[in-house]
Amino acid sequence: MNYLDILKKSFKIVKANKYLWVLGLFAGSGFALFNPGGNFSTLLQDKNSNIKSFLGKNTLGHFFMDFGAWLRNHWIILSVVALIFLVFILSLVILAILSKIGLIYSVSEISEDKKTILRK
């Protein structure tokens, strides 16, 4: 396979059809929300950690007791915020899936020298 020819053809298709950049942007960013990365467990497992020595056992216990009381008093607000966040995440996932479908369909039609729905 000649990869240079494939790259040249791909660049020519993208250069002629600028909307493919937008579809590619949405298609590539949809599932990035589920893999934020980071490893905080090693920080909390270290016995000499600054966080543990700063908070201490009593302060941490009081914090969780106060936070539990706050949750009991404000559970409706927390539920609404969680629901809005869930709807937002689901809409991003749906947008990513639809963008991938549109990208695949558009490139397939362009490679067969047909007009795409997005260009009509």
Image (spheres, rainbow, N blue to C red):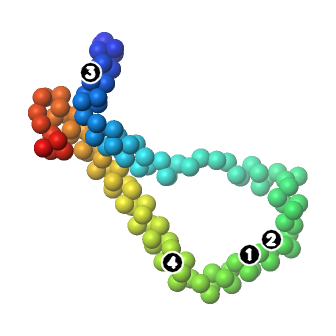
Q: Residue at x 29, y 29 (%)?
A: 15
N-terminal-most mark, 3 or 4: 3
Please tell me how crowded label 1 is: few (under 14), some (14-19), or many (20+) other residues with Cα within 10 Å: few
N-terminal-most mark, 1 or 4: 1
N-terminal-most mark, 2 or 3: 3
Q: Which residue is mark 1?
A: 64
- Asked if marks 3 and 1 touch (Cβ < 8 Å), the reply is no
Label 3 secondary element: helix
Please tell me how crowded label 3 is: few (under 14), some (14-19), or many (20+) other residues with Cα within 10 Å: few
Label 3 amino acid? Lys
Q: Nearer the viewer, mark 2 or mark 3?
A: 3
Q: Position of residue 6 (x, y in %)?
A: 29, 19
Q: Residue at x 42, y 63 (%)?
A: 88
- Where does the N terminus fall, quadrant-wise? top left
N-terminal-most mark, 2 or 4: 2
Horizontal side of 29 relative to 116 (left or right) equals right
- Asked if marks 1 and 2 touch (Cβ < 8 Å), the reply is yes
Question: How far apart in space, not on screen, are marks 1 and 4 (Cα)?
Answer: 19 Å
Question: How far apart in space, not on screen, are marks 2 and 4 (Cα)?
Answer: 25 Å
Horizontal side of 29 relative to 68 (left or right) equals left
Q: Which residue is mark 4?
A: 79
Horizontal side of 64 relative to 7 (left or right) equals right
Label 1 secondary element: helix
Residue 9 numbered mark, or none: 3
Q: Residue at x 33, y 20 (%)?
A: 7
Label 1 amino acid? Phe
Label 2 amino acid? Leu
